[in-house]
Image (cartoon, grey):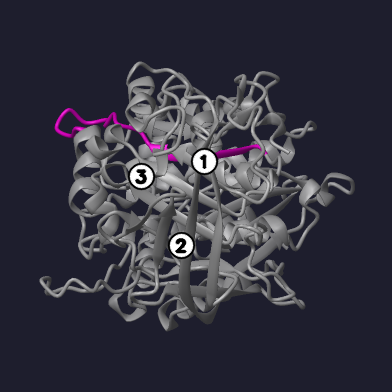
Amino acid sequence: MRVKTWVSAAALAALLTACGEQTTSAETAVVSADANALQSHLEFLASDALEGRDTGSRGHEIAAQYIAAQFQALGLEPAGDNGSYYQRIAFRRSSLVEGSAKMIVDTGSETFELEYGEEFLTGPSAYTTESTVTAPVVFVGYGLVSEEFGLNDYANVDVDGKVVMMVSGRPEELPSEEGAHLNSSKTKFAAERGAVGVITLHTPMREEVRPFKVSAMYQRAPRVTWLNPEGEPNVTYKKLQGSAYVDYRAAESLFANAAISLDEVFAQLEKGEQPKPFELNSKVTLARQSSHEEISSPNVAAILPGADAELQNEYVLYTAHSDHIGVTQDLSQDDHINNGAMDNASGVSVLLETARMFVEAEERPKRSILFLSVTAEERGLLGADYFAHYPTVPLQQIVANVNLDMPVLLYDFADVIAFGSTHSTLGDSVAEAAGQYGIELSEDPMPEQAIFTRSDHYPFVKKGVPAVFLMTGFTAKGEDEDGGKIWGEFFAEHYHRPSDQPSLPINYEAGVVFTNINFEIGKTIANDEQRPRWLPDSFFADLD
C-alpha cells in the first residue's frame, strides 16, 4: 500500500522557482520536507519544559522518548538494544575534589610546589578516586607522531614509566583538519609509549589566543566519559596516572637541569622550528582526588530496511545529537534555560523529517537507512563515540555518515558548506543534491576551525566511515540579507546561550530546502551501486 505523501505548496513553489526551467528530480519529487513539521519538532525539543536537554537529565530523557515515538509512528524498525529504539549508555561524571590537586617539581637540589588554579590546572581521574605519581620528566616538543608529515617527537627518547611534557598546539605548517586530528591524539601517542603522566605547557603564543586565567575559569566543571559494558571508562590509557596544564610563567623550575632552557624552547617556537625531545633531568609528583557519579542517557536508533536483497545489508547512517548544555548557573541572567533551538533541535528536526521522507518516498532505497539520535555530543561527542565502538549493526557495513548538527536556519541561504566533502567521493553526492535545489556548494570559509573534527561524524571517520556534514553557507539569496553576518551574529550572541530558542526568526522554508538536500544526499548514497570511497590522497583514508 502506498503511503500518502506530504508536499508543502509553498515549499514546492519555491523549489520550482529556484530550479527555473530545468527538469530535475527535485521538481518531480514525490516527497518534500514540510515547514510545519520542522517547526513542530523544533518547538517541542527546544521548549523550556525540556530544560536544555543536558546529558542524563529528565529533559533529555523526554527528548529521547519523543524521538523514539516519532520513529515508531513512522513504522521504522528499532535499532537499539534488546529490540528497542534505545541504546542505553552508562556515563561516569568525575569531579576534582576541592584542594586535592598537587604538583611538586624536584630538581634534586630543590623542590617547588606549584599553586593550583594560578600556576597549573588539572582535571579529575575517571579511573580512581585517588591517584599519585612521581616520575622523571621528558620533554617531547609538540608530542606528535605522523609518518605522513614526517613527525616523531618521541625519537631517541625513552618515556616508558615517565611523565612527558609537551607544548600546547601544533606546528603552523600542518593542514588544519589533519593538524586538529593529530593534536587530539597527543594523549594516545604518550600512552602508547608507556608514559605515566602528561604535562602540557601553556606557551606565550597560546596566551595571546586564550589566556591561562580563562582556561582556569572552566577547570572545576565535571568531566564525563562513557563506560563500556564491563563498567570501565572508555579511556584506554589507565597507565596515565597524572596530568597537568602548566602556565609558562611557572614552568622554569622544570627546566632547571635541562640542557636546553625554557626560553630557548620558546625562541624555537617563535621561529616556527620544531623543538627536539630531551630529558629534563628532574622529577615531578602529580596528585589528585576525584569523586565519581554514574549517570545514564540513551542514543535512539531506527532502521528503514533497504529494498535490494544484497545492498540492504549495508547502511547509510544519519546522525544528529539530541542533547544540549542544560541550565546555566549564571545568576546574572533572568533566563537560565539553554534551549538549544539551533544547537541542535534544528538538526534533530531535519533528521525526523528526513526519516519521514524516506518512509513516504515512491521507492524504497536500495541500501538500508539508519537514523541515529546521539546523546552527549556537548560532553565530547560521547554518544556517537560509544556507538562507533559498540554499533548495533556491523560497523563495516555502514557505508557513509550524513551528520546533521546545528543548521543555522535564520536566512534564505544560497549555498552550503560540506565539511568532509573534499576527503571522499561524498563530495560529488553533495554537489549533485544541492544543485537540484539551485544551491551552490562552497569551500570551507573558516578552515582554521577544523570543524570536520568537531562533530558527531568524527568518531565514525576515525573508524574508517566516510562522512559529510552540511552547514548553511554564508551567501543569502536576497539582497537584503547577509548570510555571513547573520551566521556570525548567531554565534556571537546566541550560541550556547539561553537566547538560542524558538523565538529566533527561524526560516522554516529554508529548513525545507536544507532537509531536501540532505535527503537527496542520503538517497544518492543508498542507491549507488558503489559504496562511497575515501580519496586516495586523503589523510583520513586510513587512520587505523
Quarter location, residue 115: bottom left
Q: Earlier in the sequence, mark 2 or mark 3?
A: 3
Sequence order check: which comes first, mark 2 or mark 1? 1
Q: Looking at the image, do the residues carrying marks 1 and 3 touch, with CB atoms under 8 Å apart?
A: no
Identify the residue shown where x is 64% and y is 63%.
Answer: 234
The dot on residue 445 is none
> Could you classify mark 3 by the number of other residues whose Cα lies within 10 Å: few (under 14), some (14-19), or many (20 or more)?
some
Mark 1 Cα shell of 10 Å, populated few (<14), some (14-19), many (≥20): some
**Picture coordinates of residue 490, whole percent (x, y):** 23, 47
Front: mark 2 or 3: 3
From this view, report whether residue 315 is shown above or below residue 497. above
Residue labelled with disc 1:
281
Q: Position of residue 499 (x, y in %)?
A: 20, 62
The residue lying toward the viewer, choosing from 456 and 399, is: 456
**Of the residues under marks 1 and 3, which one precedes in the sequence?**
3
Q: Is residue 402 visible?
A: yes
With 103 as the anchor, is 403 left or right in this view? right
Describe the element under mark 1 as helix, strand or loop: strand
Residue 101 left/right relative to 119: right
User: The residue tagged with tag 3: helix, strand or loop?
Assistant: helix
Q: Left or right? Give the position of 71 relative to 455.
A: right
Does the residue at mark 2 contact the one at mark 3 (Cβ under 8 Å)?
A: no
Residues in magenta, as a range: 466-482
Q: Say what amino acid the circle numbered 3 marks.
A: Ser
Q: In the rendered image of this protein, does residue 389 appear above or below residue 542?
A: below
Q: Which mark is residue 253?
A: 3
Where is mark 2, residue-wise? Answer: 379
Q: Which amino acid type is shown beneath numbered disc 1? A: Asn
The percent position of residue 74, horizontal first and vertical second, equals: 61, 68
Q: CA distance from mark 2 to mark 1?
A: 37 Å
